């Protein structure tokens, strides 16, 4: 596992991934549209592939219900997001009012996700919150 030199990049691909927790346990299987047939591809914890890095541009949480729900977004120091190895909370049990959004991070607070890290989320209410991440994969 090497940290890529992002001064001499080969490629930069933009992407958007989303996740809607169907329960209240931590989840980290993000999906994004795959091809023109609208298939989806799984991203475990937004973890970048080997020899790449992801620049997380934004994470936005939307409450799609009529009740307040709390959101947690966390960074783990492993590629499969095990909540027992959390290193950093980006948002911890933040109340998201009904029918509103919360910007957890944006372009002014972007950060890099290495291949040995992952991002997972929790919601206090099943299917109440949708999390959307915008990122660049740099190789």
Image (tube, rainbow, N blue to C red):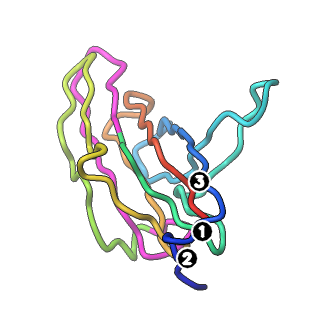
- Up/down of 139 relative to 77, above or below: above
What percent of the width, then of the height, locates residue 16? 53, 38
- The residue under the point 25% across, 20% down is 100
Of pointers 2 and 1, the one earlier in the residue sequence: 2
Q: Quadrant of the C terminus?
A: bottom right
Residue 12's disc number = 3
- In magenta, the rendered stretch is 60-82
Q: In the figure, is residue 53 to the left or right of 123?
A: right
What residue does disc 1 label? 52
Figure disc tally: 3
- Name the residue rendered at 43%, 51% in the picture: 25
Q: Residue at x 33, y 52 (%)?
A: 73
* Nearest the eye: 101 or 69: 101
Does residue 31 appear left or right of residue 117 in this picture? right
In the image, residue 37 sits, relative to residue 71, either above or below, namely above
The stretch drawn in magenta includes residue 63: yes
């Amino acid at each position: 596992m090497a940290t890529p030199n992002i001064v001499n990049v080969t490629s930069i691909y933009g992407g958007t991934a989303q996740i809607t927790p169907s329960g209240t346990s931590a989840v980290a299987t993000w999906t994004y549209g795959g091809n023109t047939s609208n298939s989806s591809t799984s991203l475990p914890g937004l973890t970048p592939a080997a020899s790449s890095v992801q620049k997380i541009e934004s994470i936005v949480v939307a409450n799609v219900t009529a009740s307040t729900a709390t959101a947690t977004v966390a960074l783990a120091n492993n590629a499969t997001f095990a909540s027992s190895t959390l290193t950093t909370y980006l948002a911890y049990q933040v109340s998201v009012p009904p029918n509103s959004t919360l910007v957890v991070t944006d372009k002014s607070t972007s950060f890099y996700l290495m291949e040995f890290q992952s991002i997972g989320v929790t919601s206090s209410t099943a299917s109440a919150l949708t999390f959307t991440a915008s990122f660049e994969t740099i190789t």
